[in-house]
Every structure is written in structure tokens, then in C-alpha cells.
């Protein structure tokens, strides 16, 4: 009788398929219970995605992939995400050590990190969302990552040169609001990213990349109190997107009705999505009343608008119901009816309270827990009977 077949008798292609769909724990088990050939197949898959949550972990990762002896492992890395938020989705490589005592980044450390990142020639996604990364980007600004399609990092010196070196990028996220971006001198239209499809970033970068992009719903971070001339220049650059602008997401300080008026002038008839996210709660001396008056007077000029978001609070979910601004919330029902009457294609509205409303049938609206993966009785019960909206139980899930 033939001896039973073992894992080592399986075809190499099958081992690869098993490794691709295995968790990190399963990969380790496969690597250490099999022979050397199986070990060589499984170990690289642990490095395919690096999700790092601390400076210590980031240093360790960069030092590892910088070593010549680990060149084969470095070639396996497809995605790197580095931030300090441990709530991120798990990945094959997770390093969440304490940040204690690591409050800065020395020149040698920055260079060591840059050397490690530059060795990752197979990168598809690079998301470096820690503020100290601004000291690393200038050291890799000439490195070409030929397969890179997603890039996220704070605004930094030589960021424009990095983007020019990697013109194949499709998704760009530069969530910085610091002073550096307000003093940066990057000529309008000077960065060609012809494959770019999503954009989040400061207005100076929007002016540089949007004229040659394929972005349809850019998210622009505006400086505090931008002058009208610069607003016009930025909006004119957005209009030049080769795919045509269908939505506009703006991140602002306060409630700039001048910006809203110019958006209406440039995009009124085409927009399907319009978002205004305020970075902070507006001081009493700067009421949003004028902003909303401008919006109500002109919303009819957005005949294609389906989504409207104007708020300065987090989205309301089952986890933060107690943070609802009761005063703003009680005034919202009439506002929703007004906006819908003036713009009948609307089916998704979020206003100052942070409650997201969705239209489910005719003029029937229900509040939505945007983060719920299953029915939330606590969320639904809070809203029942408070407004003449649709029966939540009838339309929920």
C-alpha cells in the first residue's frame, strides 16, 4: 500500500494558493511544519502587507528590508501602511509596540527609514500617515516605484518631485493642514498624473495635479480665509480634469460663503456630490447662518445633486448618540424637506448634527448608522417617534 501523501507532496502552485489565502498564524504553522521548500514559499507572504502602528515598529521594519540579506523578503512587500491608530484593519504583518520615548526622528533614523522604503521595488501601495514621515519623503523623492498606484503621506518638501518621479499613481491622499503647504510654491498644472482617479490634498497640490488627472470627485483641503483670486484659480484647475468633475468634497475652517458662491458659479449644473466638512466647531461670533442662507438660495442650481453633506461634527452612529447636537438636530427635519423640494434628486443628506439621512421612498427619509454592519436596535430606538419620517423597521436592512 502506498504511503499517505504529505503537504510536501502537493504541487508548488497549490502551496502558493494556500499561502495567499492564509492568515499570519496559519502561514507560520505551514512554514514550520513543512519542509524547507514550503518554508521558503510561506514566509514571504507574511511580508506582503505591512500594517505598522508605532515608530519602533516602523524602524524595525525599515531596518529589516534594508539588509541585503533580506532582499528577497523586500521584493515580496506589496503594501505598507504606517500610522499610530491601532483600530486599523489587521494585516499579515502587525507591529504595534509602544511609542514611549520616541518623540522625534534623528537624521540617521530618517535616512535608515528612507533606505528601507527605497528597497521595496514591488510596492503597490505606500501609506505613511505619521507626521514624522515628512522627514523621510525628501530622501526618496527621486526613487521610482514603477508599480505604485496608491500613495498617502503628510505634505512635505520635495513631495512634488516624488510625484513627478511616480507619475503612474492613481490614488493620492495628502491629509496635511500645516503651515508648510501654505508657503509651498508649486506652479499650477506642473505635476502630470494622467492616471490619477482619487485625490485628497491641500489646494496648492490640487492646482498642480488636477488639470491633467482623471479625478471626478476631488477632496480639497482649503487654507483658512483663502482669497477670492486663489479660490478662482483652484476651481479653474479642478474644472480642467479630463474626466469632468461630478462631485466636490471640501475641508474648510469656518463657513466660507464666498467659497460656496464660487463653487456654485463654476460647477452648479454638473455636481452630484457636494460636501463641506468644517475642521472645528464654529465660534459663536462666526455663525454659519450666512453660509446656509447662500446654500438655500442657490441649491436649485444643482439639478443633478444626490448627496449633500455640510457639518462640523462626527457622523452619528450607535456609539456616539449622546454627542448629537439636540438644537441643530431639531431644526434639521424642516431643512431636509426644504433642500429636497428645491433639489428633488437628493437622496442622502448630512447636516450640522452629524446625522445622515437617506431617502428610501418618495419623500420618506430615515436616519442611517453609517458604521453599522448589522441592525442596531439602540440607534433605531433613539429616533423612533421623534419625526414623521419613514418607519425605520420597514426599511432598515
Image (cartoon, helix red, strand yellow):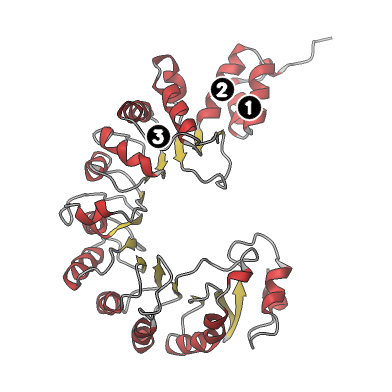
Please report whichever mark, 1 or 2, sits nearer to the chain's N-terminal start: 1
Query: Which residue is label 3 attached to?
Result: 123
| Label 3 crowd (10 A; few <14 / some 14-19 / many >=20) | many
Which image quarter: residue 129? top left
| Label 2 crowd (10 A; few <14 / some 14-19 / many >=20) | some
Residue at image coords 67%, 29%: 26
| Depth order, front residue of 327/264 | 327
Q: Position of residue 108 (x, y in %)?
A: 32, 26
Please report whichever mark, 3 or 2, sits nearer to the chain's N-terminal start: 2
Q: Are marks 1 and 3 in contact (CB under 8 Å)?
A: no
Q: CA distance from mark 3 to mark 2?
A: 18 Å
Query: Which residue is label 2 attached to?
Result: 43
Q: CA distance from mark 1 to mark 2?
A: 7 Å
Rendered-image quadrant of the C terminus: bottom right
Please report whichever mark, 1 or 3, sits nearer to the chain's N-terminal start: 1
Rendered-image quadrant of the N terminus: top right
Q: Are marks 1 and 2 in contact (CB under 8 Å)?
A: yes
| Depth order, front residue of 23/58 | 58
Query: Which residue is label 1 attached to?
Result: 27
Q: Residue furthest right?
A: 1
Amino acid at each position: 500500500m502506498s504511503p499517505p501523501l504529505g503537504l510536501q507532496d502537493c504541487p508548488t502552485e497549490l502551496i502558493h494558493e494556500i499561502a495567499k489565502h492564509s492568515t499570519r498564524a496559519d502561514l507560520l504553522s505551514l512554514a514550520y511544519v513543512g519542509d524547507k521548500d514550503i518554508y521558503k514559499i510561506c514566509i514571504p507572504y507574511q511580508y506582503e502587507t505591512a500594517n505598522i502602528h508605532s515608530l519602533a515598529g516602523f524602524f524595525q521594519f525599515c531596518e529589516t528590508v534594508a539588509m541585503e540579506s533580506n532582499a528577497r523578503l523586500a521584493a515580496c512587500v506589496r503594501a505598507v501602511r504606517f500610522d499610530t491608530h491601532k483600530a486599523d484593519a489587521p494585516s499579515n504583518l502587525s507591529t504595534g509596540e509602544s511609542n514611549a520615548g520616541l518623540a522625534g526622528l534623528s537624521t540617521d533614523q530618517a535616512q535608515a527609514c528612507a533606505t528601507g522604503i527605497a528597497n521595496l521595488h514591488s510596492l503597490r501601495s505606500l501609506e505613511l500617515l505619521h507626521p514624522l514621515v515628512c522627514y523621510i519623503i525628501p530622501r526618496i523623492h527621486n526613487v521610482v516605484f514603477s508599480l505604485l498606484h496608491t500613495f498617502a503621506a503628510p505634505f512635505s518638501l520635495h513631495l512634488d518631485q516624488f510625484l513627478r518621479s511616480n507619475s503612474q499613481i492613481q490614488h493620492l491622499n495628502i491629509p496635511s493642514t500645516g503651515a508648510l503647504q501654505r508657503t509651498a510654491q508649486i506652479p499650477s498644472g506642473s505635476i502630470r498624473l494622467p492616471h490619477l482617479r482619487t485625490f485628497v490634498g491641500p489646494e496648492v497640490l490640487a492646482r498642480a495635479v488636477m488639470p491633467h488627472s482623471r479625478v471626478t470627485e476631488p477632496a480639497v483641503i482649503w487654507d483658512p480665509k483663502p482669497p477670492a483670486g486663489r479660490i478662482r484659480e483652484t476651481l479653474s484647475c479642478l474644472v480642467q480634469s479630463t474626466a469632468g468633475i461630478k462631485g466636490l468634497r471640501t475641508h474648510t475652517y469656518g463657513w466660507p460663503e464666498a467659497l460656496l458662491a464660487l463653487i456654485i458659479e463654476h460647477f452648479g449644473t454638473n455636481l452630484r456630490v457636494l460636501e463641506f466638512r468644517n475642521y472645528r466647531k464654529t465660534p459663536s461670533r462666526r455663525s454659519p447662518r450666512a453660509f446656509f442662507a447662500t446654500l438655500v438660495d442657490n441649491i436649485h442650481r444643482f439639478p443633478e445633486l444626490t448627496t449633500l453633506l455640510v457639518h462640523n461634527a462626527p457622523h452619528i452612529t450607535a456609539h456616539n448618540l449622546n454627542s448629537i447636537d439636540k438644537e441643530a438636530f431639531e431644526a434639521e427635519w424642516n431643512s431636509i424637506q426644504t433642500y429636497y423640494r428645491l433639489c428633488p434628486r437628493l437622496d442622502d443628506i448630512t447636516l450640522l448634527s452629524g446625522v445622515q439621512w437617506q431617502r428610501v421612498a418618495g419623500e420618506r427619509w430615515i436616519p442611517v448608522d453609517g458604521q453599522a454592519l448589522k441592525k442596531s436596535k439602540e440607534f433605531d430606538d433613539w429616533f423612533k417617534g421623534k419625526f414623521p419620517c419613514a418607519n425605520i423597521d420597514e426599511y432598515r436592512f
